[in-house]
Image (spheres, coloured by chain):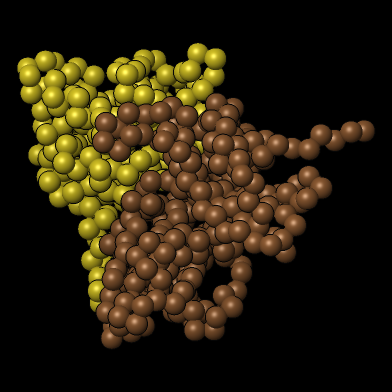
Amino acid sequence: MKRINSPMSEEDARSLRAGETVFLAGTMITARDKAHMRALQMSSSGEAVDIFEGATVYHCGPIMGGDDGLKVIAAGPTTSARMNMLAPRAIRELGIRAIIGKGGMSKETHDALVEKGGVYLAATGGAAVTLAEGIKEVTAREWEDLGMAESVWTMRVKDFGPLVVAMDSQGRSLYDEVEQRVRKNTGL
Amino acid sequence: MIILPESWEDVVVRLLRMSETHLPADVSWALEAAAAWEGGDIARSQLGTILDNSSKAEFLARPMCQDTGLPVFFVTGRIPADIEDSIAAGVKRATKEIPLRPNAVDPLSRENSGDNVGSGVLVHYRPMDVPYTELTVLPKGAGSENMSRLAMLTPSDGEDVVKDFVVRTVLQSGGRPCPPTIVGVGIGGTADACMSLAKEALLMPLDSRNPDERLRKMEEDLFIRLNSSGLGPMGLGGDSTVLGVKIKMASCHTASMPVAVNLNCWAARRATARMNDDGSVRYTQGALE
């Protein structure tokens, strides 16, 4: 079982290779459509958006519960492709180092990851309870007004995974390889 | 002992809890079968994680996926006049009690109602002259719903073009709808009716047999073609791209050929309750006789 610390150094992120399976330890933040949009708007108007700098961003809108509303009930990945329009800028301007999601992302996003030394990790879609087990604590909530699913939650994780390195900093993408295989197999 | 009859609101809460925390047996079997025939390491680990997740969700009585969906309801048999109010009340209560993620938003302002009801619940009705009311819930996540497609083909296109459209729709959606998916296909009707047929097809248990021989053959052909594609679990490559293909058909206009595809993620949640005239209720996640 390969463990990796989060946030990751550029060197760590660049050392990961497509096809590897890793488990995460450290901290990560959640961000979906609205959080990306707000962060980029802030950045455009010259405001600093520190929480994204060097961060591991989990495309996830969790279910939170418990008396304080800080207990993670279920937290699987959401479809990353929705962030395709926002991610390249977020990687270059905000300094996102690693993305965790499902379904893969565009070539433009992959280019930004290659350029900045980042990586895309695929979590198993729908495996919300198994993945929540790896989330030990929620340490902060930013942008509460965006609602439960769209807020930015800071999470302390241990053995969070399994995560498949699906798009690496060498430019290799498992999704591209599968797409080529599917095309060959089906003739479509 | 006096057993108080369950209210429809209680039934709705129970149906949502059942469907969100426990996979129907036919879906579990299909996932286990898929895990057994997968060859690749990544595909096997994806299915292993899914199975692990399903048993933990059931044990902890937690929703198996954080996208608890928008609940789509189907009412058949006797239709109580106030059923829609009861459903809305049940959904609001279940959202707090289970809990469910509040997903219902105003489409333009994107403001979240916080109760999974918003402007109203989604209900399909089919009145029948029978001594009971049957209520089914299909909580529908957005990952799979967003991959829905409708094609108004031409009558001369024929069966092969219909099948190609289904295959293309599933494969072009890649890993986004959380494969292995269940493919609901509607053929015929009008544009709206065709899409409804595709959604209703998702209610058919995987181990049910399509009574129409032609459709059964099409389902088998599509199942084999899709699972030989190599797309695999989560679009990361493998032999299990779909758990099943279900087709529903209705007559259409002589000048039309509508085809609709509605996908369900592997977390294919559904549950049904039947309330008889005496107030007794039966629950199932399979088919009721």
The answer to whether B221 is drawn above or below residue A43 in the figure is below
Q: Nearer the viewer, residue B37 or B222?
A: B222
Q: Quadrant of the N terminus of chain A?
A: top left
Q: Position of residue B282 (x, y in %)?
A: 74, 50
Answer with left or right where residue B209 lies relative to residue B243: right
Count of numbered tags:
0
Q: Position of residue B31 (x, y in %)?
A: 54, 58
Q: Quadrant of residue A119?
A: top left
Q: Quadrant of the C terminus of chain A?
A: bottom left
Q: Colour of chain A?
A: yellow
Write the residue at 32% across / 28% down.
B111
Answer with left or right where residue A9 lies relative to residue B21: left
Write the residue at 38% across / 39% down.
A77
Q: Quadrant of residue A90?
A: top left
Write the residue at 37% across / 29% down.
B112
Q: Nearer the viewer, residue A154 or B223?
A: B223
Q: Nearer the viewer, residue A2 or B60?
A: B60
Q: Nearer the viewer, residue A132 or A166?
A: A132
Report whether residue A93 is seen: yes
Write the residue at 57% across / 59% down.
B126
The answer to whether B129 is drawn above or below residue A59 in the figure is below
Q: Colour of chain B?
A: brown
Report whether residue A122 is seen: no
Q: Position of residue B101 (x, y in %)?
A: 46, 32
Residue reaching furthest to the right: B1
The answer to whether B69 is drawn above or below residue B146 in the figure is above
Q: Position of residue B214 (x, y in %)?
A: 49, 84
Residue reaching furthest to the front: B81
